[in-house]
Amino acid sequence: MADSRDPSRPLRFRLLDLSTGISGGYCAKLLHDAGADVVKLEPPGGDPLRTRSASGRPVDPVAGSLLFQYLHAGHRSAVVDISTPAGRDQALALATKSDVVLENFEPGEIESLGLGPDAIHTGNLAATLVSISAFGRGGPWSNRAATEFTLQAWCGSLDGRGIPGLPPVGIGGRTGDFMAGSAAASAAVAAWFAARASGRGQHIDVSTFEAMLLSFVAYQPIFAQFDEKPIGRSIEIPSIEPAADGWVGFCTITRQQWSDFTVLIGHPELGEDDTLAYAGNRMQRCDEIRDAIAEWTTKHTVDEIVEQASLFRIPVSPVGNGQTVTEMDHIVERGVFVGHPAGFRQPRRPYRLGALPQPQVQPSPLLGRHTDEVLEGASERRPFPPADGPSEAAAARPFEGMTVVAFVAFWAGPFAASYLAALGADVIKIESIQRPDGMRFGGGVKLDHPQMYEFSAVTQGATVGLRAITLDLERPEGVDLALRLVERADLVLDNFSPRVLDGFGLDEAALRRARPDIVIGRLPAFGLDGPWRDRGGFAMTVEQASGLAWRTGHEDGQPLVPRGQCDVLGAYHLLLGIFCALEHRATTGEGLLVETPLVEAALNVAAEQSIEWTADGVLLGREGNRSFEWAPQGVYPCGDDDRYVVISVATDDQWHSLRALLDDPALDDRTLDSLVGRRSHHDRIDASIVAWLRDQHVDDAVERLAAAGVPAAPTLDARRLNDLPQLTARGWFEAMEHPVAGTVLYESLPMTFSDVPRPMYRRPAPTLGQHNHEVLRELGLDEKAIAALEEEKVIGTRPAWL
C-alpha cells in the first residue's frame, strides 16, 4: 500500500490494474506516482508489453522490457487467469477491495468475464471502473479493429502532415496511447474524489480516438464551422530547420514572432508581406521561404541560433533525441533525469508539489512476484473506505463548489480550466483588453468581422464552460480586483512564462496573502527555474526539445513536429498535480504550488528514447509510416481518389485476414506468419496491397478491411469529422449558442462518466469580458463602480486598439 508517511504521493488508494500495453500502463504509472498502490493482475505469460523491444534488444519476459519497467516501477505483479472461473473469482475479490479498477479489453469483454461495473459494485459500490478502448463503448465502431496509427488517420492528424503531392506521414512514438492513459488517469482521480463524497463509484469510458481527436488536430472540427476550406497537407514554416551542426526548432504563433523571425534571418521583406502573416499561407511559397531560412541557419550552429533567437523572444529549441535530452543544460540543472533500479535513466514525475521531495523510483516487479501476497490480501479490509453508504445529496460532478481563478491563454492552461469546469468548478478566466488571449487572433477566419477575435477555434474549444472577465493588471485597480477573486478561490491556474504574473505583482507570496492555503497550478514551458526559465515556448517548441519530433518524419528526411499534443498532455499532468495538492491541503491544511513544465510532461511520454539510450546506447529514430511492432503498416494510394488507405496489422490473425483479402499467391509464404518475417519483406507486401487497392474506392476498401477485422482507415481532412457516425452516436459534439458565433458544436472530453451524462459543459465559450458585470457584482461592486472601471479601461469587452 502507498506509504501513508510519504507526503510526496498524497493520493492514497488502491488500483487493480487488469490492463495491458501502453495506454493502461501509463495510466497506472501516473496513478502510482501520485500515491496509488497498484496491483497489476497479469495473464499467464504476462502483459505482452513485457516482451516489446523497440531496438531489437533481447528481452527477459520475466523482468520485462525497458518500457514495461519504466511504466510499472513500484507496482505489484500477480498472475491470475481471469478467463477461468477460479481466476475470475480471485479478480472479483480483489476488485471489491480496490478503489479503482483499470482495464482496456475490447468493449463488452470485461462484462463477459463477470468483472463489469455491476459485478464490482455488488461487492463495493464505491469502486470506480476505468475502461480504455479504441473508439469507446457504444456507437457503430465500438468494436472496430484499430491501432494508434489508424486512429491518427481517423482523427485527421495524419492527412494534414507532409508535403502536398506526396503521401502524408504519421506521428512516431505511440503518443496517442500515452494521451489516452493521461486522460484516463485524470478521470480516475476525479471519480475517486466524487466517490469519497457520495459513496458511489462510477464507470469511466475513455475513447483513445476522442483523446487523440481532442489533442492532435487543434479543434479543426470547430474551425470547419467558421471556415469550410479544406486544410491541405503542410508543414509548419518555420519549424525544424537545418543548422550547421544539426537541427534547430522554431515556432512563430503570433504575427510579431513571425515578423521578428524574418528580421533574424535577414529577410524582413517576408515579414512586411501581409499575406504571410497568416501561417496557413506560407505553404504556398514553401520552397522560397525555406531556402531563405536555410541560407541563414546553415551558417550558424544550433547554440548560436538559439542564443540569437532567444534575444528576439522567438520560441526556439535544439531538436532533442534520446541522447541529447539527457545532456541539455536546462534539463541537467533541474535534475529531470533520475535512475531506475534496472540501470537506465528516466524522467522524474513531471510535476513538483511545492517543496515536497520527488518520489523515489522503485523496482519494477518480476512476473508474478507478488501473486501469493496479493491473493492473500484479497480478504483484507479495504484500508481507505469511502463515506458510509451512497449519498444521494452528493454532487455527481466531483469539483462542484470549487472556484478557480485562471490566468491562462492559448491552449494548455485554458484546457485544464475547461476540464475542471466540465466537472463542476466555477472557473473565471482573466485577460485584459490591452492584452487579450493571443490565441483569439490565431484562427485566421472571419477577418472582416468586427469581432473576429471571437472566432478562434482553439479559444472556442479550449475555453468552453468558463466565465471570462477582463482586468488591466498593469493598473493597481486591476491587481486589487484579481486578488479579491483569489481570496474566494480554491485554486489559481497560470500558464504564462514565469516572469508574467510576477511582473504584475501576483507572485506566490501575493497570492498567499490573499488566501494562505490557495493551491496554485503553474504550467510554464520549461519550468520556474533553470537556464531556459524565461524562454517562450509553445507545444511545438516542447515537441522539438523533448524528442517527440525526432521520431516523426521519414527515415531519410527531417524531423517533423507532431503538432500541438503537448498542450493537452501538459494539462492532464498539471491536473494530476493539482489533485495531489488538493488532497494534501485536505489532510494538512497547507496549500501548495504545483509546477508542471510542459517539457517534463513531454519527456515522460517520449521516455522510451532516453531509456533505450541510457540502457544500451541505442538511438531510436524515424521510421516514416512503418513500425517496429506492427507490420505491414503504411499509407497506400487507392484508385483515383486523392485520399489514401491506412493499414496497420497488429496481430498474426489480422495478417491472415489481410492475406485472404489480398488473394495474392506471392504472399503464401510461411516466413510472413511472424512479425519479423513481415518486416523483412515489407516491400513485397506493400506491392501486393497497392495492386489490390488500385481499382477500389477508399471508403469501400476501408469497409472491406474493417469487416475482415483488419485495422484500417481512410485519410481524412480534420475539418470533415463533424458527421462521423461514431462521434454522433456517442454525443461527442455538444451544441450551444455562442453570443457572437451562433450555434457551435463544441467537442466534449474524451471520456464519459456514468454519473455525468453528456453534454458535460454547461455554457459556451465566453466572449472577451462577457462576465465582467456578473463577476464584479459578486465581489460587491455596484453598477456605478463597474461603469467607472469601464470608463478607465480597467475592464472592457473589446480589444483596446480596435
Image (cartoon, grey):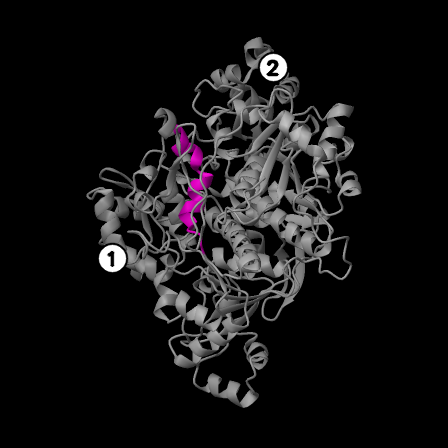
The residue pinned by badge 2 equals 664
Q: Residue furthest left?
A: 299
Q: Residue at x 67, y 44 (%)?
A: 99
State how many labels appear.
2
Query: Which structural element holds mark 2?
Result: loop
Assess whether mark 2 and mark 1 are in contact (beta carbons under 8 angstroms).
Answer: no
Coordinates of residue 425 in the picture (x, y in percent): 61, 63
Q: Quadrant location of the N terminus? A: top right
* Left or right: where 685 falls relative to 711: left
Q: Residues within 10 Å of mark 2 (few under 14, many from 20)?
A: some
Q: Can the viewer see residue 236 in this picture?
A: no
Residue type at numbered disc 1:
Leu
Comparing 702 with 541, the one in front is 541
Out of 699 and 709, give the one closest to the viewer. Answer: 709
Between 196 and 636, the residue placed more toward the observer is: 196
Q: For residue 610: magenta?
A: yes
- x and y percent of residue 345 in the render? 38, 33
Query: Left of 296 or right of it: where is 3?
Result: right
Does the stretch in magenta take in 538? no
Q: Position of residue 575 (x, y in %)?
A: 53, 53
Point out the image quarter for the C terminus. bottom left
Q: Is residue 429 above or below residue 357?
A: below
Q: Name the residue tied to disc 1.
A: 311
Magenta highlight: main SS = helix
* Callout 2 amino acid: Asp
Q: Which mark is residue 348?
A: none
Q: Residue at x 56, y 87 (%)?
A: 782
Q: Note whether residue 393 is visible.
A: yes
Per the model, the C-alpha gap separating discs 1 and 2 is: 60 Å
Range of residues picked out in magenta: 594-612
Q: Quadrant of residue 556?
A: top left
